Every structure is written in structure tokens, then in C-alpha cells.
Image (cartoon, rainbow, N blue to C red):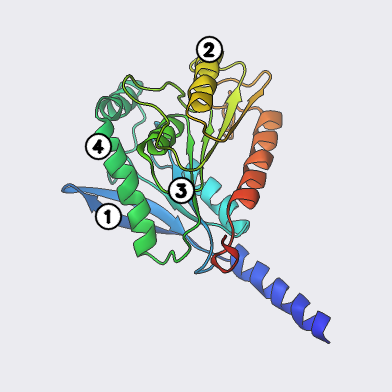
Amino acid sequence: MRSLIILIFLLCTAIIASAATGQRIGYTVNGTDYEGYFIIPSVNAPLVLLVHDWDGLTDYEIKRAEMLADLGYAVFAADLFGKGVRPTAMEDKKKLTGDLYQNRKKMRELLEAALATARKNGITSSQAVAVGYCFGGAAVLEMARSGADLKGFVTFHGGLTTPAGQDYSKTKGQVLILHGTADESVSMNDFALLAQDLEKAHVSHEMITYSGAPHAFTVFNSERYREDADKKSWRRFTEFLADTLHSEDNAQ
């Protein structure tokens, strides 16, 4: 009888998690309106802060957020461009990301505000990891260098260059880099230099490359998508989350 009760409980928990629905959350940073996407399967679920690529917060990030929610994680997909700002023209993407690359203080403030917004909207767990795609990966590494109190920082085909005057001496969490060997936007030299920077700062890290994978290899339905690299990197990411994050009841 006891086994049956436990089984029913686990099934109900899985159903609740899979039935989680997301919502758009508005917030303001220094007088500008932003709009993130929030999905939470349970009140004590560990948090994944997800940062978009240079297209802004689109259906791609929402899909990834829902995939993570199905695994039992709460996800807040941040908005670093502004409510309704979802660039499609190349020059607009370059301008929006370039402005933040030139203003690292603003980038950090936006990341901190996104994290604070998640916590204001039901997150009770202290367990959190940040993950980013492309431009978002570069933003997540900025967050790591800032000394943000997170368990981990993960990038998928992200920008890896360490800005002049910065280092990883304040980084508190583990770092996971998932990169394409065929990436022509972020070179293997950048990859190697980051490894040296992390090692010099004694930051626990793991860095993996995938053969034949170009920049943006995880983006579904694009000509750059590489299914093998996407599935392998996603598997490693979810293993990293399982190893790094715990429910609040089991937090170390």
C-alpha cells in the first residue's frame, strides 16, 4: 500500500510539472520597460535564468524554457533589449548587442534585475544557474565575472572573449561551455584563451566542443542546426543541472 501511495504521488508530481504554463512578466529597469517569460512547475523548484541571443526573447527561448520546466526547473527568460524589441534586421541586432557590449554596467544591471524579478514572482529556492545562447552566452559570462551568487554559468555557442580589465576572480559557480568546433564567429582560439582565464582564476569548469557544429548549432529549423551536437549538448546541460542544482528541501 505504501508503495502504491508513493507511486501515485510521483505520478501526480510529474503531471503537475508537465502541465506548468508560462506567463509574460513585465518589469522596469532604470525607467525602461522589459518583458520576460516565466514558467514555474513548483514553488521550491530550482531556477534557471535563461538569456536570449541577439534576436531578443523569442519563441526559441520560450521553447527551451518549457523543455526545462518539463524537467522540473523554474525558468525566467530575461529580456535585455526592452519590451517588444525583437530585432530582425542585422544592423538592429548589431546595434542592440553592441550597445550592451559597450556598456557592461548596464548589461549587469539588466541581468540582476531579471534575477530579482524571478525571485519576486514565486521563486523560493536559493538554487540557481544562468544559461545563455550566442549573445546570451556572452552575457552569462559577464554575470559570472560580476560575482553573481549562482551555482553555475552555462553557454551554448556563446561569445567567449574576456573584456579588457576583467577576469574571473569573483566567479562563484561552476562554468560549462558548449561550443561548436566549426564556429566561425567565435574561434577555437577564443575557446582556448577562456580556458586559460578560468584555470588562472581557479574556476571549476568544463568545456566541450562538437565537431562540424557551426555558430548557433542549437537553433531549431535553421540551416545551422546540427541535431547531433544539439542533442549531445542538451544532454550534458541537463546532467550539469541535475548535478549542480537541488530542490530547496535537499539544498546543501
Q: Are marks 1 and 4 in contact (CB under 8 Å)?
A: no
- The residue wearing badge 2 is 189
- Mark 2 / mark 4, whichever is N-terminal: 4
Q: In the depicted view, which residue is nearer to us: 210 or 52?
A: 210
Answer yes or no: is residue 10 visible.
Answer: yes
Type of residue at label 2?
Asn
- The residue wearing badge 1 is 27
- The residue wearing badge 3 is 150
**Seen in the image, is 107 located left or right of residue 167?**
left
- Mark 4 / mark 3, whichever is N-terminal: 4
Nearer to us of marks 4 and 3 is: 3
Mark 3 → mark 1, Cα distance in angstroms: 21 Å
Q: Residues within 10 Å of mark 3 (few under 14, many from 20)?
A: many
Residue 6: x percent and y percent? 75, 78
Residue 106's disc number: 4
Mark 2 → mark 4, Cα distance in angstroms: 28 Å
